[in-house]
Amino acid sequence: MTTTAPHPSAGAQPRLSGLESRDVSAWFGSHKVLERVSLTMAAGEVTALIGPSGCGKSTFLRILNRMHEMVRSAQLAGEVLLDGEDIYEHGRRPAEVRRRIGMVFQRPNPFPAMSIADNVASGLKLAGIKVSKDYREHLIEDSLRQAGLWNEVSSRLGTPGGSLSGGQQQRLCIARSLAVEPDILLMDEPCSALDPTSTRRVEETIAELRGRLTIVIVTHNMQQAQRVSQSCAFFLATHDTPGRIVEAGPTEQLFTDPADQRTADYVNGRF
Ligand code: ADP
Ligand code: MG
């Protein structure tokens, strides 16, 4: 592929955005699943969300880009601030919020019959972003490079996304998220369907992206949380209390000197 158009942001300092939830509570119908979750996800950092299944991590992640609104019974209280502005503010369009705050899911979900190149560019179309052909090509290459996939696919960009391995498909989904140049990337257990080698490649990608955008990752893998994140939040729900944050802080501190016994028990695999 030849690139003629310079990337508008090439060489420029990236503009980093922070995300903050304030007293976020959530319900599905009458079932309360989150209770006053307040968390600062610092600009340019990787924040890991950990905790047992069912404690509301995925729900919280979806609230961070208004994706939970797709569930009709979902109700929300509290605020989510992107660079200090509430993403739920009246008049703000969910599609614009989702363009700035991308999401990668547990199961890689590229369009299997669509070419690798078109998969990467598909987010532009969905977001209604029109770019020149040259810039589109540049974005495809740049996004695939950032996702650590360029060298593996540059000679076959026209082949279907579904022809890639599971790990490559997940990096293709990361590239697709990056192509719309988001400020924040949310990742919901992005490696739990992957083998160890593919997991390592995705972790390398996360390490590369760190400092260029703000990442929030849900993981059940405690080693992974320690490898990729600078900050960590431990969520917990019980049979009669909704999910809430027991403890949040620097990852190193949560793992080596947690303030709460339940955090110590969880990170050491005792429940
Ligand atoms: P986690 O990701 O930590 O495993 P979830 O956010 O998926 O937790 O789920 C939190 C709680 O919300 C669970 O009790 C789950 O059953 C419930 N829940 C999640 N999604 C829905 C939904 N679409 N409708 C109703 N309840 C849901
Ligand atoms: Mg989940």
Image (tube, helix red, strand yellow):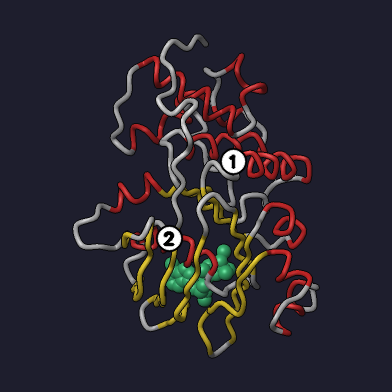
Vertical order, 259 against 1 (above or below):
below
Q: Is mark 1 within 8 Å of ligand 2?
A: no
Residue 172 image offset from top left, x and y in percent: 56, 34
* The quadrant where residue 135 appears: top left
Q: How far apart, in angstroms, are the residues tagged by discs 1 and 2?
A: 19 Å
Amino acid beneath label 1: Leu
Residue 108 image offset from top left, x and y in percent: 57, 43
Vertical order, 8 against 258 (above or below):
above
Q: Is mark 2 within 8 Å of ligand 1?
A: no
252 sits left or right of 77 in the view:
right
In the image, what residue occupies the spot 64% across and 39% down? 208
Q: Secondary structure at mark 2?
A: loop
Between 137 and 68, which is closer to the camera in this rendering?
137
Q: Secondary structure at mark 1?
A: helix
89 sits left or right of 4 in the view:
left
Between 131 and 165, which is closer to the camera in this rendering?
131
In the image, what residue occupies the spot 20% across and 62% down? 90
Residue 49 image offset from top left, x and y in percent: 60, 64
Amino acid beneath label 2: Leu
Residue 253 seen: yes
- Mark 2 crowdedness (10 Å alpha carbons): few <14, some 14-19, many ≥20: many
Q: Number of numbered discs present?
A: 2
Question: Closer to the N terminus: mark 1 or mark 2?
Answer: 2
Question: Which residue carries the number 1 mark?
Answer: 209
Disc marking residue 247: none
The C terminus lies in quadrant = bottom right
Q: Quadrant of ligand 2?
A: bottom right
Residue 23 image offset from top left, x and y in percent: 41, 77
Disc marking residue 64: 2
Vertical order, 105 against 247 (above or below):
above
